[in-house]
Amino acid sequence: MSDAAVGPAIADDEAALATPFVKCLVRLIRAQDSYGSWEGKPDAELLGDFILTKEQRRAIPIVDDPDPDVLWRLDKFYAAVGLAIEERSGLMASPVMEMSHEGFGRVIFTAGRLVVLSKTLRDVHRFGFETLWKLAAAGTKLAGDAIATIEAYPEVARS
Amino acid sequence: MSDAAVGPAIADDEAALATPFVKCLVRLIRAQDSYGSWEGKPDAELLGDFILTKEQRRAIPIVDDPDPDVLWRLDKFYAAVGLAIEERSGLMASPVMEMSHEGFGRVIFTAGRLVVLSKTLRDVHRFGFETLWKLAAAGTKLAGDAIATIEAYPEVARS
């Protein structure tokens, strides 16, 4: 890759790391670092396993149960969405996730009696994003959709 | 047991079997009988495994994963709650269930953007009811609570 191509990619990464959503995600991951072994690790490296190129995605077999590490990342990703919703709305949005062994499932966030977000999960075996920026955009969009729903039905979310 | 004690118990069972909730449950179970092997089995016998005396409950170990048969019954029970809600409200109430290996979890029913029912699951290993009547009462109450929520927020349930 030439320097000209690397430049914008790094700028994108930095912008991604500065989003409130990615900050939530990094905070959740660092909270699990009981022995301080990731202390010297920069955020981008900590999120490295979330990033998969198209070729890497395709190489992951979809037979058998999803890898426990993938499930851990999926869990952290959606927990970060919940945290981002909470930061912006002041309401606890708790996720409930249901998944089959084939890697299909559903995640629902509720606040009070309101379903603030409902998403079908597919291809969980290959959960990942092409770039940090796409990771940031996906999480930010989910949190934004949830906030819009809360604003549409504020009294139900607070019930 | 004397005849005098058996009499009311049988009447209770018959009343339980006549409730809309238990009818939903029986219908769901019979739908799984692809080979017709339960055709000659009366409803009360079909639901026999849902009934546990206090002593039987206590005898079930709560270490290790819940028994797959228990999970099957739990699943059918909540599917029947969903069906009973649908019969009474005309709205599809779909359950999402999340469970830990320790037999704790949560089940949520949603219709549109409304959480019509949310229940914590405990002691799943020992899922069962002392009598058919208590099974009928538990399912009927859950469906009734959901209906009351739908009536409180009809526009959210239909959104």
Image (spheres, coloured by chain):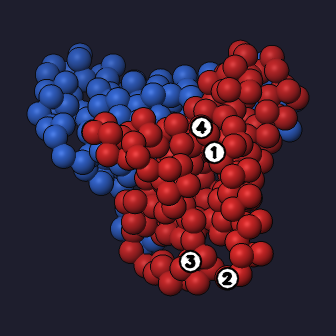
Chain colours: A red, B blue
Pointers 1 and 2 in contact (C-beta within 8 Å): no
Q: Earlier in the sequence, mark 1 or mark 2?
A: 2
Could you tell me which secondary element the residue under label 3 belongs to? helix
Please tell me whether mark 3 or mark 1 is closer to you in this view. 1
Picture disc at residue A24: 4
Disc 2 residue type (three-letter)? Met
Residue at 70%, 72% (x, y): give it. A6
Q: Chain of mark 3?
A: A
Residue closer to the observer: A29 or A35: A35
- Residue A110 higher or lower than A135, as above or below: above
Q: Which mark is residue A57?
A: 3
- Residue B140 seen: no
| Label 4, label 3: how far apart the Cα atoms are | 25 Å
Distance from the alpha carbon under mark 2 to that under mark 3: 21 Å
Of badges 4 and 3, nearer the viewer stands 4
Q: Earlier in the sequence, mark 2 or mark 4?
A: 2
Name the side, left or right, on which A93 lies relative to B70.
right
Residue wearing tag 1 = A22
- Within 10 Å of disc 1 (Cα), the crowding (few <14, some 14-19, many 20+) is many
* Badge 4 element: helix
Q: Height in image: B125 above or below B37?
A: above
Chain containing mark 1:
A
Say whether marks 4 and 1 touch (CB < 8 Å): yes
- For the residues labelled 4 and 3, say whether their Cβ atoms are less than 8 Å apart: no
Location of mark 2 (residue): A1
Residue A134: x and y in percent read 71, 60
